[in-house]
Image (spheres, rainbow, N blue to C red):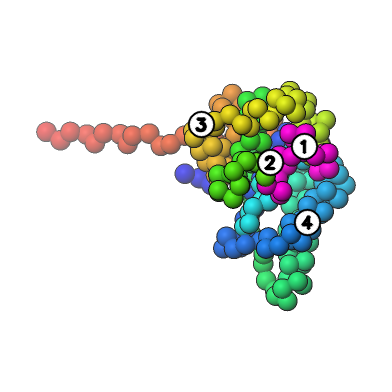
Amino acid sequence: MPRIGRVVAPNMPHHVVQRGHNRNAVFVDDGDYAYYLDTLANWAPQLQVKVYAWCLMTNHVHLLLDPGDDIKSIGLLMKRLAGRQTRFVNKQENRTGSLWDGRYKMSIVDSDEYFLQCCRYIELNPVKAKMVIRPADYRWSSYQENAGLLPSVIVDRHGFTSLSGVSFEGYRKYVGKDTPSSEAEFISQRLESNRLTGGSRFVKEIELRTGIRLEYKRPGRPPAKPTIK
């Protein structure tokens, strides 16, 4: 199947994941996490990127970002985040070399169907990894912002509310529900292949907006060989 490159659309949420080089740890102590979040909090507004959800795991990060009108802004933000964190860690550990894998994964999200599902998927990462029992127990995700347990410092609260249509209490109940395994599998598969997180209607909509063919059909059955009599 042909490889699909990263596609960006203006004013839409994009699920982004970036992993440590060879899946090595990126965040070792609290200072590493705090430095990354400081860069995100400062540079996302400067580049006019809205942050709807985020989660920093030991060896990778999940972000749900809206580039606004400028489709180059997510790439600029990811470059800034990766570069600053690499320099910080290299200086702290007296090392050189790459901290991250070369390419981050990204998937445009159908905000009508999958916005809340992607937020829940991102913020339940620590629970799925059995690092904590409840998402509220994990310090390094947006759950406490989106659930109203802490002030919104990084998350664009207005944008989140507009797209989600839920209150703080409603979001807490939503995340607390049992999550179908098929939901997590679908989101993960779409992200890992740089494909759209949405159905066929959404795919056609984005193809029309971008002028890029994004989905490929599997080749059909080969024609039958002629019978030789």
Q: Is residue 14 magenta?
A: no
Residue 136 is tagged as 2
Query: Do tag 2 and tag 1 residues touch (Cβ < 8 Å)?
Result: yes
Q: Of the residues under marks 4 and 3, which one precedes in the sequence?
A: 4
- Name the front one of labels 4 and 2: 2
Estimate how packed mark 3 is, as few (under 14), some (14 to 19) or many (20 or more) residues with alpha carbons within 10 Å.
few
Query: Do tag 1 and tag 4 residues touch (Cβ < 8 Å)?
Result: no
- Name the front one of labels 1 and 4: 1
Q: Disc 1 versus disc 4: distance between alpha carbons?
A: 19 Å
- Name the front one of labels 3 and 1: 1
**Dot 4 amino acid type:** Ala
Q: Is residue 144 visible?
A: yes
Indicate the quadrant containing the C terminus: top left, top right, bottom left or bottom right.
top left
**Dot 3 amino acid type:** Pro
Q: Quadrant of residue 15?
A: top right
Query: Do tag 2 and tag 3 residues touch (Cβ < 8 Å)?
Result: no
Residue 180 is tagged as 3
Identify the magenta region. 138-154
Q: Disc 2 versus disc 1: distance between alpha carbons?
A: 8 Å
Magenta residues, dominant SS class: loop
The image shows residue 2, relative to residue 39, as above or below, that is above
Q: Using residue 128 as the reference point, say whether residue 47 is left or right of it.
A: right
Residue at image x 60%, y 34%?
A: 197
Tag 2's secondary structure? helix
Please state which of residues 143 and 77 is positioned toward the viewer in this rendering: 143
Q: Which residue is mark 4?
A: 34
Q: Disc 3 versus disc 1: distance between alpha carbons?
A: 25 Å
Which residue reaches farthest left?
229
Residue 62 is tagged as none
Q: Quadrant of residue 19?
A: bottom right
Q: Which residue is mark 1?
A: 149
Tag 4's secondary structure? helix
